[in-house]
Amino acid sequence: MRISAQMKMADLVHINFELLSVLQRLMIPFGFKDKSVSTVCNENNVDVDFFLALTQWFLNRDEFPQQELMNYPPEWLIGYLQHTHKCYINYQIPRLEKEIEQLDQLLNAPDHSAQVMIHFFKEYISEFSEHIEEEERVAFPYILGVEKVVSNKITYKEFVEEYKDYSIGKYLENHTDLEEKIFDLQNILLKYVPPPTNNCHFTNLLIEIYRLGKDLKDHTLLEENVLIPKVKEMEITLAKLAGKQ
Amino acid sequence: MIRILIAEPSYILRKGLIQLINELPDTSEIEVVGSHLGLIEVLNHFSPDLVILNTSIAVAIPMEEIKIHLPDTSKIIHLINTPLPPDSTSQQISIYDSKLVLQEKLSHYIKPEQVHDDEENSEELTSREKLILKHVALGQTNKEIASSLFISTHTVISHRKNITRKLDIKSVSGLTVYAILNGIIKMEDIS
């Protein structure tokens, strides 16, 4: 369905509760009363069309609004991704970690199965955190820097001093890895681990991991299809600026 | 499961293709891109078995570049915005093709997966594959495995492909977990 800025924000969430995470990531607080989507967005300094583009995509997965999202300032999307990161690091991951640690009570395994899984997951988490940190520390500031030069907010000289020979290509490298491993984890838990003793608990864990995998896929999609093409576009302008120096 | 990437700028055509593919008797995973932007990145991480590529997108990126980023076994179907002669090959489809023609051409690539539960066709690893897996799980590179087993690196790679296909596990650490769970290596072997 097509959603509009005149709809009530609360109704939108009723349609699909997954949108709660979009609201959280855009730092839109709840307590909407009967306010419309556009009122709530305006009150929280979120661009209504940007909000609608993201929301529409959450509701209709096979239509990714690439062109539309590319038209907005990259800092909006970066803000969205940063808040996603925060939620992972401060809440989701520690919680999952605790659940995984209980695996040895869950699995009906005489051997080391549980420890092996715990080890795998811990390794995964540290890689995951590293990737997020690297994004926050290098890639995002670089992208924002490129945007500032292109829109004449800082000079080319200032930019070069800050980000000597970084380019966006470098950052793409370990993306695939993270996705691959979470799918491996799903498959191992689903297909190869001895049947669990507490089915309810184990099923829940698996659902959470699937959700993390799906989130990660979305994350990659936003980065690979919006942020990176946008930066590559801007890097062309940048190269022209460099030529003039 | 066959992985299909649809690279097509038109919304209606994308929708139509997805609908058509979903009517075929196979479970497919479908990804879409609407322009050449980001296409290479998607190719790299999705590694599709089949790409349905509109010629209008293909003009923006050299064909060689697309092929570099595709697995060797991947196929490409070109989607053409003009009518095709009646005897055209299955590598080309036209937006004017009838449903029957489209289904016929697509079914060359999208064949129903055979599920066998019997021993012969099972996805069990062969003893050779288990041996390779053991070395992989112990952290050896393809080259090291090749020289310690007196086989070519090429052979090692093809064994590894089969292992990954059978188990649905791609990463080395995932394979290590599998190897331990199945007693192919011991916990103490890895430190």
Image (cartoon, rainbow, N blue to C red):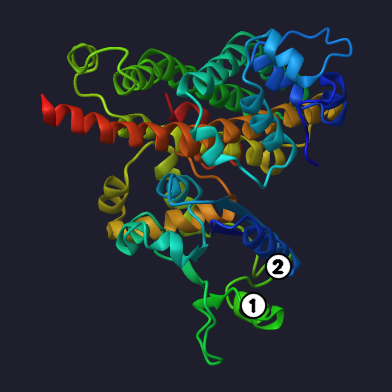
Taking the spot 47% from the left edge, 47% from the top edge, the residue there is B42
The residue singled out by tag 1 in the image is B102
- Residue A109 placed where, x, y %? 72, 30
Residue neighbourhood size for the residue with mark 2, other residues' Cα within 10 Å, grouped as few (<14), some (14–19), many (≥20): some
The residue singled out by tag 2 in the image is B20
Asked whether the residues under marks 2 and 1 belong to the same chain, the reply is yes
Taking the spot 62% from the left edge, 20% from the top edge, the residue there is A47
Asked if disc 2 and disc 1 are in contact, CB closer than 8 Å, the reply is yes
Q: Nearer the viewer, residue B75 or A192?
A: B75
Q: Where, by quadrant of the figure, is residue A204 drawn?
A: top right
Placement of the N terminus of chain B among the 4 image quadrants: bottom right
**Left or right, residue B189 beside residue A202:** left
Which subunit holds the residue at mark 2? B
Find the residue positioned furthest to the bottom: B87
- SS at badge 2: helix
Q: Nearer the viewer, residue B82 or A190?
A: B82
Instruction: Residue type at mark 2: give it.
Output: Leu
